[in-house]
Image: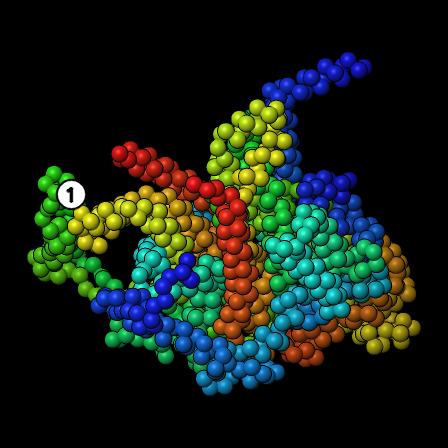
Amino acid sequence: MKRRSDAFSSLAGDPRIRGIIAQVILLAVLAGVFGWLISNAADALSRQGKVFGFEFLNDTAGFGIIQTLVPYTERSSYGRALLVGLLNTLLVAALGIIIATVLGFLIGIGRLSQNWLIRQIATVYVETLRNLPLLLQIVFWYFAVIGSLPGPKQGYSLFGTFFLNNRGVFLPSLVLEPGSGVLAISLVLGVVLAGVIFFVARVQRLREGRSFAALPAAILALIGLPLAALIATDFPVSLSWPALKGFNFQGGVQLLPELFALLVALSTYTASYIAEIVRAGIEGVPRGQSEAALSLGLTRAQALRFVIVPQAMRIIVPPLASQYLNLTKNSSLAVAIAYPDLVSVFAGTALNQTGKAIEIILMTMLVYLSISLFTAFAMNIYNARIKLTER
Amino acid sequence: MEGRRPAISVLEWLRVNLFSSVGDTALTLGGALIVWFLLVPALDWAFVRAVWTGDDRTACIVKDAGACWPYIGARMGQIVYGFYDVAQRWRVDLIYALGALGLLWLTLPFMPYKRVAGVLMLSAYPVLAYVLLTGGMFGIDPVPTQRWGGLLLTLIVSATGIIVSMPVGILLALGRQSDMPVFRWTCTAFIELVRGVPLITFLFMASNMLPLFLPEGAAVDKLLRALIAVALFSSAYMAEVVRGGLQAIPRGQYEASKALGLSYWPMMGLIILPQALRIVIPGIVNSFIALFKDTSLVSIIGFFDLLGIIQSGNSDPNWAAPNTAFTGFVFAGAVYWAFCFSMSRYSQAMERRLGAGTKRGQ
Amino acid sequence: MTRHWNSLAFAGFAVLSLTSPAIGAGGPTLQQVKAKGFVQCGVSDGLQGFSNPDDAGNWSGIDVDVCRALAAAIFGDTNAVRFTPMTAKERFTGLQHGEVDLLSRNTTITMQRDVALNLEFTGVTYYDGQGFIVKKESGVTSANDLGGATVCTQTGTTTELNVADFFRVRGLEYKIVAFDKEAQAVEAYEQGRCDTYTTDQSGLFAIRLKLANPDAHLILPEIISKEPLGPAVRQGDDNWEDIVRWTLYAMVNAEELGVSSSNIDEMLKSENPEIRRLLGVEGSFGESLGLSNDWAVNIIRRVGNYGEIFDRNVGAGSPLKIERGYNKLWKEGGLQYAPPIR
């Protein structure tokens, strides 16, 4: 008896064997727990007369959605509703990322400004917005700020062109008429040409130390080409002006109040994080670098542009990417203010109408997970690249 | 630093800090405009034009009225206790008081027996809070969790998250660094899975999907399900913070511990973790702050936490006035801000103190 | 056993464990209800007239009274009931999974719910229909004027689908803003985000009372859907289904026979055989349900007949002041009709 327990303890004492035993136990526990959960779910589903499956995606949704970037009617399928929700999520995320980046860089630089007042304002901004729950900010913008705006008839207007009221923001929009294909082509060409100009300028600068004025040339290409196309094709575009008709404004582009509130809250909140990242990035560049640049005769702006920023970007970009990801995930809080994003439309309305809780929640998680993994993948490539250029 | 600088005149300070050049002056003027158009109206609204007394909305429907503070006063009971029975609120008070005392003990630098206090706060205190709040034992009346709300619920959710996510996060981080592939894969998969999705989908999972995965008849309280979701979610983030600390420990520390004959757990518990955790204290506090802010999401799945109770109060017809919603949100914001800001300040102070202790002469 | 599993599965959370009493759904529901001493009743999370908690947390409303009547029938005590507020989203899962013994939560009876969700509806407590509320200043007086309107509604309900059908059939333009919670949808409507809010008409009356200025709002006359509201139980326990169904029928029959909480003692001496059977003086209908024979007496004495419940909660005797309308007895031109007890 004693011997056996000795043998056992010496066996268990060997860390390698103990490790294997522990792993086998973990595997067994995991398999057991998952098996148990799945069998429970299977029981529950059969009790409720439900079948696990994704056929419901082809069923008619039957409900309306207020903002659709692709054609969608009540007769469309749940699968289509999923796509509409996903595109709405991507729309708010893309707009939010642009605004948050601009705002975040401004405030981050403001935090390091030599001007005392600007520094204080930037600090107060960061310390306030970072320490308030995002959800609170979203519902504040929606229910307190936009909610207290007057209705369409009494709303604010700027030059009779832009309108702001509790139905959202209304802007004039471009209406493309037949023949505007040339304009689209010229736009694309303009962008390509601008890219080429920058590239040539860069090559020339690397080779000769200085280059022609790339920026004005690029702007000329960007604006001049489409303008020429417009004149050549006798202006095939017209503007649609928002005008009050019946209950609401018709015509133009409407920025839904839900989108507006979500966008403002998401981008101002994320900007407070981006500002800190930018500050840390610039502070992370050793002081000697800017001193050396200045003593070489570069101006302050040139030193920033060619010496500080390129080095700071290496520190800034990885956490910046994770903030972009956070912003995208945080856009799911749209459900609190009825913006029809992925969670609101699919994990909200569609889940309620179909009762397919397991399928829908798993699919929703999978979509976000794919976005996250894609970002992580892109970041790995970026990190590998900046490592290579290190000298 | 500041004190040693040679004294300069006010004018000199202004010149250097506000008007050093034309551009600088323009910036100063721009900043002054921002302050003038944001800060002044805000203070005016919150204090000067604010309504301070009244019994219902009539007091706040005055022309040019600012914040409607009596609304907050009338709702204070619900904001602090939720729907907890009025006669039983002493139990919540007791928990609040004990918690505040415990936290003071732990955070004030000059208090002795910190270890004892820490152990008590992590073991006896949660048990006591659970017994007192739920009731139904020792002759105190049961109070169902549906009645918990307001700040009480916010604090319960965040405290549970904090207490659970610390150990679970450490275990996950160790698992992710482990030599044993099964542990490493499991922990990595869990962490990346959780961090890849928004918290709200996790909460929806807990409220809509989890019941299906439990055996028939095993009804798990709705609040417990939400607590589990929040705790698991923050554990994954905590694990990444702790991993950062573990990676910063030089290999020599591991090798030295092994050379001393320490096996895995003593090595981790006595040598590596104390150092790793110390490095990442700011990160830990940051995830506590994030967690505290994230608790507001439980209002989406039907709980009346601080934000939820303010939102439901904003539509109270007795207080319907143009400034009610503003006042409610500003008040809730002030409470959240006070908690988050003091946590971040505490972590900065802590960082400085620890930094001073570990810095060596060069 | 379930208790054991429960504690095992969540041992990690034992410190803060909040497991509610495990509710088995295995055997006949009545046995379990009797064993635990109360009925667990799923109600809405706050709808005046149907189920609404006051400041002290006491529930009242038609749906609540159905639960209380059931408690009276089983225990002779209207307080032997506990209420679980449920969102529209949670309600069916909660019932199917045994969190509640019955769902009495202004729930529309539909074929899909009855057949595909494996629920049993046990009768109609209130014949409702979907309507619209608008601001009087909009000048709209009929639902047909709503073309181009923005409509606020709550997701997860039949209303969201009905409103789509309504506008589609008439070829009218509309925009829908669908909120997760009713309170927020109403707040958005009141702030002017939407031109109209839509839900069951009874709900609109309740909501109008909670608006800052109820007189500024108009409930449009049109009803765009059939919404028979009634309690639901899980499929598979016929005895429990019978008890809930006949509790409701007893209240309707009592009104038809003129038996009320105020005259119940006299009625016990009545010679009318229908009344005698209802009150258990003749026959043993209560025992055949597994209850005592005075089950209906307990219901009527402690809760009242259908007319009393209606008046007290939503009708003339309540702040809502909803007309009886379709909810009149069949003899008076309404739809409320209960099969006889015999």
The quarter in which the C terminus of chain A is drawn is top left
The quarter in which the N terminus of chain A is drawn is top right
| SS under mark 1 | helix
Q: Is residue B316 above or below residue B293?
A: below
Q: Which residue is depicted at the point 38% across and 65% down? A: A120
User: Viewed as shown, does residue A59 lie left or right of B111?
Assistant: left
Q: Is residue B277 above or below residue B46?
A: above
User: Viewed as shown, does residue C67 lie left or right of C296?
Assistant: left
Q: How many labels does the image show?
A: 1
User: Viewed as shown, does residue C120 lie left or right of B192?
Assistant: right
Where is mark 1, residue-wise? Answer: A202
Q: Residue furthest bottom?
A: B63
Pinpoint residue A338: horizontal percent, then vertical percent: 46, 61
Which of B324/B40 is in front?
A: B40
Pinpoint residue B189: horizontal percent, then vertical percent: 51, 35
User: Viewed as shown, does residue B15 lie left or right of A319?
Assistant: left
Camera sees residue C332: no
Which of B277/C30 is in front?
A: B277
Camera sees residue A318: yes
Q: Which residue is depicted at the point 31% across and 61% down? A: A114
| Picture quadrant where residue B258 is located | top right
Pinpoint residue B142: horizontal percent, then vertical percent: 77, 59
- Letter of the chain that mark 1 sits on in the rendering: A
Q: Which residue is depicted at the point 53% across and 33% down? A: B176
Amino acid carrying label 1: it is Arg
Which of A113/B183 is in front?
A: A113
